[in-house]
Amino acid sequence: MKPVRTRFAPSPTGYLHVGGVRTAIFAWLVARQAKGQFVLRLEDTDKQREVAGSDKHLIECLRVLGLDYDEGPDIGGPYAPYRQSDRLDSYKQWGQKLIEAGRAYADPYTPAEVQAFREQAQAAKRPFRYRDHRPAQPPAWDGHQPLRFKSDPKPYAWQDAILGNLSTGPEVIDDFILIKSDGYPTYNFAHIIDDNAMAITHVIRGQEFTASVPNYLNLYEALSLEPPVVATVPHILGPDGNKKLSKRDGAKDVLDYVREGFLPDALVNFIACLGWNDGSQQEIFSRDELLRKFSLGRVQRSGAHFDERRLLWMNGHYIREMTLDDLFKAVQGYWPPEASDASEIYREQVLGLVQERLKYFAELPELSRFFFVDLSVDPKLISEHKQLKKLSPVELHSLLQKAKLAIEESDFTPEDLTKRLNQLLEQTGQKPAVLFSLIRIATTQAPASPGLADTLAVLGKDRSLQRLESQLSALASS
RNA sequence: GGCCUCAUCGUCUAGCGGCUAGGACACCAGGUUCUCAUCCUGGCAACCGGGGUUCGAUUCCCCGUGAGGUCACCA
C-alpha cells in the first residue's frame, strides 16, 4: 500500500472561514490517522484574484488550529516547490507531452468568439460544448493562445469516498483549458499534475468540483496517470437560508474566532462534527478521539448549517474543562484594562469565579470588571429589581446597615461569610431574594455576578465595606 | 434550462425493514438559600409529498417537490 498523502490546496485569495477549514481538518485527519503525510500547497494561478498576505494568513490559521503539515511552501519538502506559480515549467512540459500525443491543441479563437458560440448554443437551447467547435487545423501552440485538452467523451462511473457511486454520460466531457493565455495553468490542469507529482493519494475538496471529476478522469487517462481517491465534502451553509457559507455573506475568519478566545480544540471539534459523527451519541471529541474515530465514509452527504450558538456552547464546555492554571495562562491579554494593577493571585481568584460563565475569552472584561474597579452606584439596579423596588430607601438603608455590621465581623473566608449571611437572614427575617440581592447589588453594581459569599471573599473586606458604605450614602440621600 | 447530487425536531445529528423515531444545541418550566452561569429534572419539537415492493416502511424502488453543485482563459 502506498503511504496515505493528503493535501490542503487553497488559493491565496483571502482569509479562511469555517467552511474552508473543515476541508483542511478532514484532510489532516485522514493523513494523520493513517500515519501518512499532510501537504500544504498554494494554488496561486489566478494573479487577478490573489490577495497579498493571504498565504501567511492561511499558514497562521493552520498553525493556530494545530493542523500541522509535513510539507509546504514555507517548510519545503521532497516535492518542492509547493506554490504553483513556481511550478510553471512542469505544467508546460506536461502540456507539451499532451500536444505530442495529440491530446491538446492551441485554441485559435478569441474570448469573444468563444462567447459567441456559447450564446448561439444558448439561443438554440442546446448545451454549449467547446468541442463542437474544435478547430480542424489548430495552429501551433506558441504559448499565447490557451492550450486546450482534446477530450475523449465517454461515460464514467467512479467511487467518491463520501458520496458513494457516481456516474455521468459522455455529454459532460469537454475540451477545457489546460493553460491560460497568460501562461498560468488552470486549476483543472495544475492540480492533477501536482497531485500526481506529489504522490497525493486522497483528494478531499468541496462539492464545487464534483461536476468536473469526469473531465479529470478523462485527463488522467490521456496522461496515463492513476487517479487518486476523491472525496467530496458538502458545503457548510450559512445559519439561515440554504446558501453556502461565504465571505461575501459575512462568514467570519477563523482566526477571528481564535482572537475572540475560542479554543482551537473546541473549534476543531465543532467544525469536524459539522457533517460528521461516529454513530454514537458522543458530542465532545478530543483530537486523539477524532484521529481514532474519523472516517470519510461517515461524513454527511448533505450540507450542514453553521450554528454559532452550538459553537458557543462547546467552547464554554472546553473552558469549563480547563484547569484554572491553564485557563489563567490562556486568558492573558483578555483582562479589562482596570485589572492591570491587580495581583496575579487576585486575578486568578476572579477567574476561578468567572470560569463557568465564560463562553469565550473576549467576554472576560464584562464579566469581571467590577472586581477591579468601583462602579458608581446605579439606582436602577434597585428601582427595577422586582423585590427591592417594593421597599423604601429607609427600609433598604436599615437593612444594608445591619448587613454591614454583620459582615464587618467576618474574617472573609467564603465559609465564614456564608455563615454570617445565614445568621443575618434569621436575624432580619428577610428572604434571600431581598437581602442577598441588596448586598450583591451594593457590592458589585452589576446586573449579574458570581455567588455572593464567593464574590465578597474575593473582593475582600476593605473593598466590600467601602462599597456598602457608598450604597448606604446613596440610599440616605434619596 | 441540461447534467450531477442531496432530503429525520428551528439547528447538528442517530437510525441502515419491526423503535413510544434516540442524543446534543437552542428554547420553555422546575430545582440548586440573590442575580448571571454551571449542574440536575422535566417539557416543546422531525421522518418533504404521492405511488409501489413487503406481513410490515423513516429505512428499498419509482415519480413528483424542494434544496445544493456545475455548465469561466475562478479556484
Image: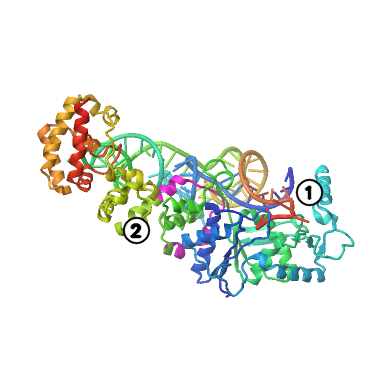
Place residue A58 in its image quadrant.
bottom right
Where does the magenta region start and end?
Answer: A289-314
Foreground pick, A231 / A470:
A470
Residue that appears at 52% across and 43% down: A239
Query: Disc 1 marks which amino acid?
Result: Pro
Label of residue A172 in the image? none
Q: Are marks 2 and 1 in contact (CB under 8 Å)?
A: no
Q: Which mark is residue A127?
A: 1
Image quadrant where one finds the N terminus of chain A = bottom right
Residue shown at 25% from the left, 55% from the top: A345
Q: Quadrant of the C terminus of chain A?
A: top left
* Mark 2 residue type: Lys
The x and y percentages for residue A79 are: 61, 73
| Residue A336 in view here | no
Chain ID for label 2?
A
Q: Quadrant of residue A288?
A: bottom left
For the residue pair A105 and A247, the one nearer the viewer reads as: A247
In this rendering, position of residue A33 left or right of residue A5: left
- Residue drawn at 82 percent across, 42 percent down: A123
In the depicted structure, whether residue A443 falls above or below residue A247: above
| In magenta segment, residue A305 | yes
Give the Cα distance between marks 2 and 1. 61 Å
Residue A74 in sight from this viewpoint: yes
Q: Which residue is identified by label 2?
A: A329
Q: Position of residue A160 (x, y in %)?
A: 61, 60
Would you say residue A173 sits in the magenta stretch?
A: no
